[in-house]
Image (cartoon, rainbow, N blue to C red):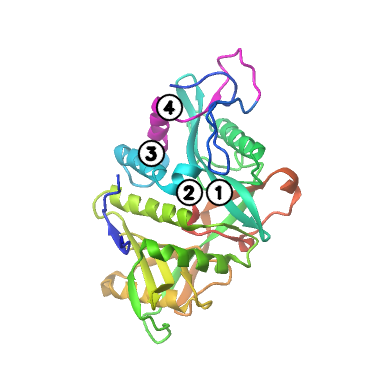
Amino acid sequence: MENWGDVHRRAPAPGIERGCFFESPAGSLNGSRPSNPRALAAAPTDNDDVPTVVAAEGLILERALDATCRTARTGLNRQAWSKFHRARLKTSWGARHERAFALVDGDNVLAAAERYDVSGVLNGAAVRVCAVGSLWTGPSQPDGIHARTLIDALIADAERDGAQMGLLFPSANIGHDVGSAFHAVPMLDLTLSVTESSRHGAPMTTVRGGEDRDLAAIVAMGRVRADHVRFHLDRDHDFIKYIITSKRLLAGLGAAHARQLHFFIAEEGITAAAYVIISVAGDSWTLEECGDRDASGARVGALLQALIAREPVERRPTIRAWLPPGFLPPQVAVASTTPSTQTIWMRLLGSRATALPLSTDDVLFWHNDLL
């Protein structure tokens, strides 16, 4: 059984169709991908100058990766970025739910993005979600028309396939002009302080590195925590493994000593009772996500205390996080709160489009959810 506790520099497991405005299969929301290309949006077919949305493959994919690598801010070089992209597609969730698309004019890539077919829960009901991330558009289009064209095509195709919501994940290329049809959910960046006293900590019989066998317990903890918010992603076993694998890849493919990943479990008996997943870059920690069977979060606080105790006294980390509404372990205090530069954009589709917008307190997103 693989132990995922500390990851530092770990190596990961190892032509364009033309015609209508949108070509090549987009992939259905249940994870299957149609075998025959189909036109997904009407446009003149006798005008070679009409930009075309295609599934990014071959040379187009390489050009899209060239472009997105320059703006992704992951610290990965071009070769590592390609490995990162391909390794994620080899996961069970990525193979079924992730696909790259590009807006092209001839051989020129005008915009590129990843489309993810995601499950969500809105007001207690399951919804099918089309999420768009890793958006890139060329600097020659400051008005965002190419990005907007690509986003609109991907969302429209997903809506025809039954999607009930569209999500845009944070990107430097998403501005108010691009997201005008979407509702912005401004997130709050919290800077956390953790008391170094152990008297508030819940007893933990075992602290160890996270493993595959812990994912079912993590799914269960997440669903209990999300039960009272209006919208959250439905994070199953494969999804959680995918996002943890993504963070492991970033740690393993980046420059030496640049990034680490902590994934630790507080265990009672043989069952995970709490967990934390933390990305480490120098003295900066990002609490990617956490969970606790105890509603107070005391075990999460104790895990943070244990991790900080391993650090040199003169180098206490700065810890940043997004936390669910109403969740704060007793060992943790909020040192500061600032509006996040990472805005999530939401859009309800079809008959749901007239529903009231969601506020920050209505949603639960972890940093790990940013695909």
Label 2 sits on residue: 371
Label 4 sits on residue: 60
Residue 89 among those drawn in magenta: no
**Counting other residues with Cα less than 10 Å from the Cα at mark 4, is it few (<14), some (14-19), or many (20 or more)?**
many
Pointers 3 and 2 in contact (C-beta within 8 Å): no
Q: What is the magenta range?
A: 42-70
Residue type at mark 4: give it. Ile
3D distance between C-alphas at marks 2 and 1: 10 Å
**Counting other residues with Cα less than 10 Å from the Cα at mark 3, is it few (<14), some (14-19), or many (20 or more)?**
many
Residue type at mark 3: give it. Cys
Label 3 sits on residue: 69
Residue type at mark 2: give it. Leu
Label 1 sits on residue: 118
Q: Which mark is residue 283?
A: none
Residue 100 horizontal/vertical position (percent): 47, 36
Earlier sequence position, callout 2 versus callout 1? 1
Say which residue appears at 47% left-offset and 53% top-offset.
239
Of the two numbered discs 2 and 1 in the rendering, the one whose residue sits closer to the viewer: 1
- Residue 129 sits above or below residue 68 on the image: below
